[in-house]
Image (cartoon, helix red, strand yellow):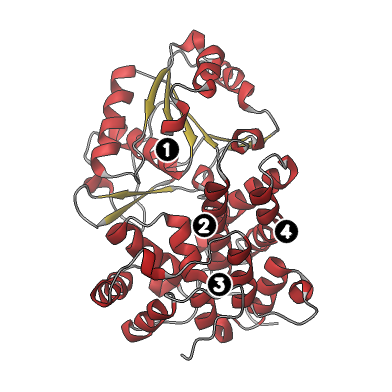
Amino acid sequence: MTAIAPFLFSHATGRVIFAPDALPQLPQLAEQAGCRKACLIVDPFVLGGPLEERLRDLLGGLGPVLHAVPQHEPDSDSVEAARDVLLASGADLVVALGGGSAMDTAKAARMLASNGVAADALANPRGMTMTPHASLFVCLPTTAGTGSEVSESAIVAKAGTDYKMVLRSAEMAADVALLDPDLGVSAPPKVTATAGYDAVTHAVEAFGSKLASPLTDPFAVSAMRLLGANLERAWRDPEDREARAACLIGAMQAGIAFNSAHLGLAHAIAGAMGALHHTPHGLANALALPWTTAFNEAALGDKATVIAECIGGPGGGSGARESAAEALSRLRHAIELDIGLDSEVPDESARDRLAESAMGSGQVRMNVRLADRGQVRVIVEHMRRPTGGGAPHLNL
Ligand SMILES: [Fe+2]
């Protein structure tokens, strides 16, 4: 047996509650914690819809203030706006309801409020000690994706720039992650696909990371199995609550894994695409992951076989043994994310800049195989071609 390398595992989320129709548990959680006033940070779709009405009914006694985040990913301006609403509300119950943007905004806004500083002062990818916020913090993810409900970090762009800050502290984590698969039923298939592929990328990259450990691997493997077996089902039939529940749990497990194992080359490229071209995060990961996995395949060793079996099942349904990259390519094709890079990144100089920017990410160093700028540029060039669900051939 090979020696186990030293590792650090961190998980600061207090409680995880999973239940169909879990939303009505909110008032009880608030009462148990003695909360008197609620502030809800939500996705824009919540306002004016049936969910707003339901939340106001459930939390009526707590004088709920609702704040919708903008459509774009959080930046220093939008998290400071949320902090101002939070401070003005005097809330001792903070609920984030939505996708990664709503949850990351709430996480950051609480820390800006309790630490009395601007977002830049808290930016540190290695994490830092922060003054806790005196509130009960509940995260309700509406899509299976970011895993932000169980991670200790938030990504916040510096407004007006392509620079993404990482805020990280155990104090940012949710006290309660409330997983309710019924909340995702109304999500459009495209959102299910992109958010779900982000979760797949978290699981695969955490599993392949240099910081993967005996505590992160079981979460990553289970996440890959659940998402591999259920993402296409949830995409095809939004009412398939069983598939949706499996994806929600898989995305959360992937979040637990990458909170400690971190991510890799696909996220380095996806982060740069988001910053430079505003490409939706899950789509950017779908464009990159089959190719970065082809690049990593040999370095992954036995783990590549595990990825292929978890995502594609034994033989990938075709009888032949698939590679990990092929299984990921087939999955993205099945959920209609097999598109070429050119629709997002228009020309050669933009592709040069994308490769350059990706190299600036710390995630490059977590990747199982160290890539240089030239190799990342070749991967970016290959991303222009859809794979039709077949094996991505990369000569690197
Ligand atoms: Fe991600």
* CB under 8 Å between discs 4 and 3: no
Residue behind mark 3: 208
Structural distance between the alpha carbons of marks 4 and 1: 28 Å
For the image, the number of numbered tags is 4
Badge 2 crowding class, 10 Å Cα cut-off, few under 14, some 14 to 19, many 20 or more, is: many
Tell me residue 188's x, y (percent). Answer: 55, 43
Disc with the residue nearer the chain's start (2 vs 3): 2
Disc with the residue nearer the chain's start (2 vs 4): 2
Q: In this view of the protein, can residue 186 be seen by the observer?
A: yes
Residue behind mark 1: 102
Q: Amino acid at mark 4?
A: Ala
Q: Nearer the viewer, residue 316 or 27?
A: 316
Q: Amino acid at mark 3?
A: Gly
Q: Quadrant of residue 353?
A: bottom left
Residue 198 — which label?
Answer: 2
Structural distance between the alpha carbons of marks 4 and 3: 20 Å
Structural distance between the alpha carbons of marks 2 and 4: 15 Å
Would you place residue 65 above or below residue 321 in this image? above
Disc with the residue nearer the chain's start (2 vs 1): 1
Badge 4 crowding class, 10 Å Cα cut-off, few under 14, some 14 to 19, many 20 or more, is: some
Residue behind mark 4: 229
Dot 2 beta carbon under 8 Å from ligand 1: yes
Disc with the residue nearer the chain's start (4 vs 3): 3
Q: Quadrant of residue 24?
A: top right
Structural distance between the alpha carbons of marks 2 and 1: 16 Å
Residue sitting at x 69%, y 43%: 245
